[in-house]
Amino acid sequence: MANEDARLVALAEAGRRFSTVGTLDELAPVAAELALDVLAASSASIGVLEREHGILRVLCNVGELADWEEERPTDETYRVADFPQLAASAEDASPWFGNLGDPEVGPAHHELLERMGMRSSSSVPIVVGTTVWGQIGGARRAHLPPFSPADVAACEAFAGILGAAISRILEREDLQAMAYRDPLTGLANRRAVGDRLEAFFHDPAIEGSIGAVVCDVNDLKAINDRFGHDAGDRLLREVASTLSTAAGTAPGSLAARLGGDEFCLLLADASEADVREASERIAVAAEGLPMGAELTCGWARATERPGDAPSATVAARALLRLADAAQHRAKRTSRRSSTVPAAPATDDPTQQHPALVEAAVAQLRSAGGDVAERLRAVATVVGHHVQAGGWAVSRRIGTGLLESISHDAERGVGLAPAAVAVQGVQVDPENYPATLHALEGGTLHATLGDGDPAEQAFLASFGYEEILGAGVRTDPGTAWLVEIFGDAVSAPLGGHAALLRALVELAVAGADQLVSSHRPIAEVVVATSPD
């Protein structure tokens, strides 16, 4: 009865005492002391889930502690992979309790109880918003009865009060951390991935290695359409749990949601076999996702800046692009996981032209009568052949602004997508002399080290190394421009300038021009090319 009185007092005091603390550092010991009474436990702890690293970090221990336990530990962590209940999403999170002899107690939990000198334990999730923030842990010695459903139910009520207090504190003090965290899944976000990669590639004399696994949720749009966006969000949180568990098996790793249906796992100092196995393991683990969803994964690993990238930003983008290209390759070949080499450099880019021409003409014949659609076909084919970092089709009416009306929407993994590669964005071509020239029926080409200074500044700003463009005027009032953007993964673009211009002019001329001659297709394009 004394324990029951202490429990009721702790529950009654929780809201009042939590309202007097202003930081998580102050809140953790207060919460742990109250949890000790709520659970009538021998010891209690408060832990926070670092989902991006796949671990639970203990903030505070109170009560009867083992010799190795610290009240305010500096590095007491547990892998989510060893404690499956920690990996649950907010919708599936539920309390857990068990005894030393229970078959449900896994080997890691069994070993922990023995090290603590305890017989039974309980774990109650702390939910903040749409994610599991952490857990309240409790343990009892052998002379006490095991935890009961009533014990755990009381702690669930306590966890609800604690979760509200944590949410209040986070809103006030965690603005910096929120800038690096995906709010839906609790994983790291694109910015955190970019910072980690750029830090790794900062010094050209790189020591160690870094691996990237990029994952894509297959048919997320169809799932949203059929089951609703709430179901889609739940699916994304399930995927996040899979990535978080994988992160916990590799020290120093980082699990992130890049945005939409794209996820990423960064692995520090992992061998090629380790990165490949991590990619395949994630894809296999995802076979149990709800609504029949699946993951396709691609991976890449670097021990130096990919493609001799001139800066850390470009190198970071290139590594993710390699992993993303591998993911697309895996999807095309119906595989769970894949890798892909960088685009092979060639001294004679015209060797690629026959295959490129055939592919472009085939797309043009099926593109229909819309000029924008045909130009999009050209940009898609050329971009694919050179493994471009992106492309854009833009239009200028009269002397107005140049407006991007179509762009590469499939390569969303890059850390700094170009401004003109976003549909509807407008720029003033008067500020870009080379672009202005191309709009009159010419070409533009620039690299970070050569070309128009305005184009070079653009490349430096958006993480690209090279730009190739070709324009055409359809009438006195309308001009079109196709731009291909190259990065450290792409093949050199300069040797394709004449061919790109010829294809652009052919696309504007219309599909009827492709069948008006009995000459081979390559000759039709060559004949259209400028001298």
Image: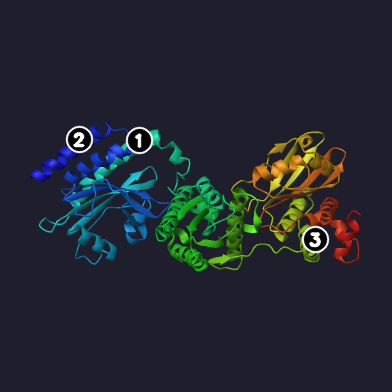
Is residue 444 visible to us here?
yes
Q: Kindly identify the amino acid type of the residue bearing the numbered disc 1.
A: Ile
Q: Could you tell me residue 421's position as x and y percent?
A: 68, 45
Q: Kindly identify the amino acid type of the residue bearing the numbered disc 3.
A: Val
Q: Secondary structure at mark 1?
A: helix
In the image, residue 298 above or below residue 510: below
Q: Quadrant of the C terminus?
A: bottom right
Reading the image, the residue beneath label 1 is: 169
Q: Kindly identify the amino acid type of the residue bearing the numbered disc 2.
A: Glu
- Specify which label sits upstream in the sequence, 2 or 3: 2
Q: Could you tell me residue 149's position as x and y percent?
A: 19, 53
Q: Could you tell me if the residues under marks 1 and 2 are in contact, i.e. CB atoms within 8 Å?
A: no
What's the distance in space between the residues labelled 2 and 3, CA to CA?
A: 75 Å
Q: Secondary structure at mark 3?
A: helix
Residue in view at x 68 percent, y 40 percent: 424
In the image, is 9 to the left or to the right of 421? Answer: left
What's the distance in space between the residues labelled 1 and 2, CA to CA?
A: 18 Å
- The residue lying furthest to the left in this view is 1
Q: Which mark is residue 235?
A: none
Q: Nearer the viewer, residue 178 or 381?
A: 178
In the image, is 314 to the left or to the right of 86? Answer: right
Is residue 148 visible to us here?
no
Q: Could you tell me residue 479's position as x and y percent?
A: 82, 42
Q: Which mark is residue 13?
A: 2
- Specify which label sits upstream in the sequence, 1 or 2: 2
Reading the image, the residue beneath label 3 is: 361
Tell me how many marks there are.
3
Q: Quadrant of the N terminus?
A: top left
What's the distance in space between the residues labelled 1 and 3, CA to CA?
A: 60 Å
Mark 1 crowdedness (10 Å alpha carbons): few <14, some 14-19, many ≥20: some
Indicate which label's residue lies in the foreground, 2 or 3.
2
In the image, is 465 to the left or to the right of 21? Answer: right
